[in-house]
Image (cartoon, rainbow, N blue to C red):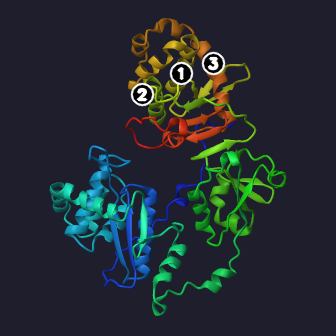
């Protein structure tokens, strides 16, 4: 049986390529090509652009690589970033180094990438021969001016997201080294172009790669997932297939979700992706391996659409799940979600019975969590009108075993709830079958309209019915 909350994904190492740790050597810049990068200071995809720019600088020492933190302002003119004040401060440090210590920003960022914790900037500054105390003082005294300069630079080039420019023109290719090298080569004069060994590249045969979707899931394909595979096989050429075609269904029978990413089973695939295969992230299907991106949006094959229905799957002591519950409840109370949308909450755990029929549970956060799951199901069953009120109170202290005061504040009798604890366990046994049957292991996960899986409240907000959903402050993530 699948262990509760243990959903397997491609390893994080597949998603970010970290450069070799070495000091960038100062060199004269070139008038022949320049690269300018804007990225949010704590965004992983933005950092990928930096790594690419840094690699370019090492390959072409005379290349001018200019970097700015990407900043945003609210309607009130306040600085905002997706990751809060800690990202604002790091953006300020980047600009402070750019202004006060010219030529040291690449070195600082390289070191910072290997010290990603909040105080890692201190180590990175020392590595770059910058006095941390002086840096902190300068940044603190000039933050507003520094951030305004970064904001103006982005505004001048109409930048709203992580972006890379070559000679003032936005780069729209893949965030991979070879396509970027080719794009830079295109602007270099003939005598300065890099040798990219085109003939040798052409000799490398890439495995077949299919992106299988349908009209209902056409917007769910993720370019980042395709990019992960392309980092292993640079000549990979994705082919889009429509699963409504009988021929495609025959070639790939029994797909559980769409989109599905199918890569041909070849010796090079088995060698390069051995870790992902061993971890179960890739499922064998005929002459292909299948990958489902369970961190994104997925259409579940075989389930009928149920319009105006939102199901939320959580672990009751998962901080990310609690934030999702609070945000959905708050939005429902403020009519930010249509009143005709039916909201259901389900739980992620694992149940079993021994030879004597004794029921037991396993949950990621231990016994207190599955007991709270059962308690919440009992309240939902017996007192549906007070369920959200109880959740709103209980979630204020969700990690505490003390639940009685939350029940009292919601107008419930703790004694009556405790007296039916066994009924709650039976309700939980039945409820977790829902998550397990859908292979849901991440809290929070949403099931939209009966057949669309969405992981994380941020992705839910991309859907039309939930664009007004307000997210309460919390770090991004999920319990797996």
From where the camera sits, is residue 451 visible?
A: yes
| Outermost residue to the bottom | 191
In-image side of 448 versus 405 (left or right): right
Between 2 and 237, which is closer to the camera in this rendering? Answer: 237
In-image side of 306 versus 392 (left or right): right
| SS category of the residue bearing label 1 | helix
- Res 399 label: 2
| SS category of the residue bearing label 3 | helix
Q: CA distance from mark 2 to mark 3?
A: 22 Å
The local crowd at label 1, few if under 14, some if 14 to 19, many if 20 or more residues have their Cα within 10 Å, is some
Q: Which residue is mark 1?
A: 371
Image quadrant for the C terminus? top right
Between 378 and 386, which is closer to the camera in this rendering? Answer: 386
Residue 217 placement (x, y as % from top left): 66, 47
Label 2 vs 1, first from the N-terminus: 1
Question: What residue is drawn where x is 54% and y is 75%?
Answer: 178
Residue 174 placement (x, y as % from top left): 54, 67
In-image side of 185 versus 132 (left or right): right
Question: What residue is drawn where x is 68% and y is 78%?
Answer: 204
- For the residues bearing labels 2 and 3, Cβ distance under 8 angstroms: no
- Res 427 label: 3
Q: Is residue 357 above or below residue 196?
A: above
Label 2 vs 3, first from the N-terminus: 2
Closer to us: mark 2 or mark 3? 3
From where the camera sits, is residue 443 visible?
A: no
């Amino acid at each position: 049986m699948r262990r509760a909350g243990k959903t397997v994904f491609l390893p994080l190492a597949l998603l970010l390529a970290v450069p070799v740790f070495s000091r960038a050597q100062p060199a004269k810049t070139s008038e022949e090509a320049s690269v300018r990068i804007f990225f949010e200071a704590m965004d992983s995809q933005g950092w990928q652009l930096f790594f690419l720019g840094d690699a370019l600088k090492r390959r072409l020492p005379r290349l001018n690589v200019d970097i700015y933190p990407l900043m945003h302002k609210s309607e009130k003119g306040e600085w905002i970033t997706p990751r809060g004040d800690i990202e604002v401060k790091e953006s300020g440090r980047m600009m402070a180094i750019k202004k006060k210590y010219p030529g040291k920003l690449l070195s600082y960022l390289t070191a910072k990438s290997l010290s990603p914790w909040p105080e890692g900037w201190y180590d990175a500054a020392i590595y770059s021969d910058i006095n941390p105390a002086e840096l902190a003082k300068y940044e603190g005294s000039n933050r507003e001016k520094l951030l305004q300069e970064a904001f103006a630079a982005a505004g001048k080039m109409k930048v709203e997201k992580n972006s890379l420019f070559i000679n003032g023109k936005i780069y729209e290719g893949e965030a991979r080294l070879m396509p970027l090298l080719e794009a830079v080569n295109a602007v270099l004069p003939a005598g300065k172009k890099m040798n990219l060994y085109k003939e040798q590249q052409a000799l490398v045969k890439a495995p077949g790669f299919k992106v299988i979707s349908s009209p209902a899931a056409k917007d769910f394909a993720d370019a980042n997932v395709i990019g992960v595979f392309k980092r292993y096989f640079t000549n990979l050429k994705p082919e889009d297939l429509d699963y409504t075609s009988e021929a495609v269904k025959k070639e790939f029978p029994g797909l559980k979700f769409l989109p599905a990413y199918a890569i041909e089973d070849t010796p090079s695939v088995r060698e390069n992706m051995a870790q992902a295969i061993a971890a179960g992230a890739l499922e064998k299907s005929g002459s292909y391996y299948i990958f489902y991106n369970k961190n994104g949006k997925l259409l579940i094959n075989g389930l009928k659409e149920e319009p105006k229905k939102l199901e939320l799957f959580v672990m009751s002591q998962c901080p990310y799940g609690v934030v999702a519950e609070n945000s959905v409840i708050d939005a429902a109370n403020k009519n930010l979600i249509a009143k005709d949308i039916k909201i259901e909450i389900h739980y992620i755990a694992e149940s079993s019975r021994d030879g004597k029929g004794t029921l037991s549970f396993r949950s990621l956060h231990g016994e207190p969590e599955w007991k709270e799951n059962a308690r919440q199901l009992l309240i939902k069953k017996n007192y549906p009108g007070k369920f959200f009120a109880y959740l709103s109170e209980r979630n204020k202290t969700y990690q505490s075993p003390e639940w009685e005061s939350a029940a009292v504040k919601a107008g419930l009798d703790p004694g009556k709830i405790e007296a039916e604890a066994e009924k709650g366990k039976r309700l939980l046994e039945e409820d977790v079958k829902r998550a397990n049957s859908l292979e849901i292991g991440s809290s929070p996960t949403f099931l939209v309209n009966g057949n669309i899986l969405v992981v994380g409240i941020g992705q839910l907000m991309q859907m039309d019915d939930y664009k007004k959903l307000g997210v309460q402050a919390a770090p991004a993530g999920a319990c797996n």
